[in-house]
Amino acid sequence: MTQDSNLSTKFPLWVPRPVEETLEIYADWAAHYDEDLAEAGYDTPRRIAAALKPYVQPSARILDFGCGTGLSGLALRQAGFTTIDGLDISAPMLEKAQARGLYANLWQGLPGEITGVTAGQYSVIVAAGVVSLGAAPPETLSLILDCLAPGGFIGLSFNDPTVAHGSYDAVLTQEISRDRVELLFRENGLHLREPPMGSDVLILRRL
């Protein structure tokens, strides 16, 4: 990977930031996002899709929340899932996702809410690399739970900086203590080869 495209030098990705700055970063990054992440060895979407398979039928309708350019949708399709909708707040990223032809429905959302989704509409929501430092804030997990049907599943990831920060696990712990959700699966593994980083893949069930 060249210095110009190195993720750790191009953007300070894994730090809290205002949503306006996040939107600017992803708008600038959309044109070469897929190339950069391929070079970085981004493996979390594949790991989430694989972790979901024991719990979710292939025909289940899945919301790919924060779908970006569609890398997570592609991983879900390659894992055998057939019906995927996508939502993201970045219009340039959504243009790239649209071009993949993977999504049954695709739309732009608004920061701080899950736009265009009614409570209980989905029994499966995936958020690959989304609920994390530098992207969606910790309370986004609670918003996802609000939208999920009882008994439904969430597949998401916390990268190593997000785990170390603690605020995201604090929200998860709170939701577990409130008997809103149970943790079915959690495993650390490869997130990126370069810069070297792991991520925890989690599968949750709404109670």
Image (spheres, helix red, strand yellow):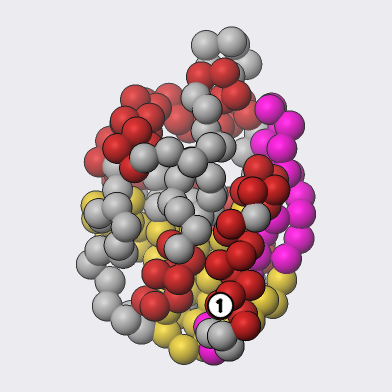
Q: Is residue 132 magenta?
A: no
From the top left corner, tell me how far across and down residue 134 is, in percent.
48, 41
Between 161 and 64, the residue placed more toward the observer is: 161
Tell how many labels: 1
Q: Splitting the image into 4 quarters, where does residue 25 fall?
A: top left
Magenta region, main secondary structure: strand
Q: Tag 1's secondary structure?
A: helix
Kind of residue at disc 1: Glu
Q: Start and end of the magenta stretch?
A: 186-207
Residue 29, position in %: x, y? 39, 27
Q: Is residue 62 left or right of residue 206?
A: left
Residue at 76% of width from left, 54% of height from top?
Answer: 188
Q: Nearer the viewer, residue 157 or 47?
A: 157
Q: Quadrant of the C terminus?
A: bottom right
Q: Residue 94, located in which quarter of the rendered image?
A: top left
Q: Mark 1 highlights which residue?
A: 175
Residue 125: x %, y % from top left = 46, 69
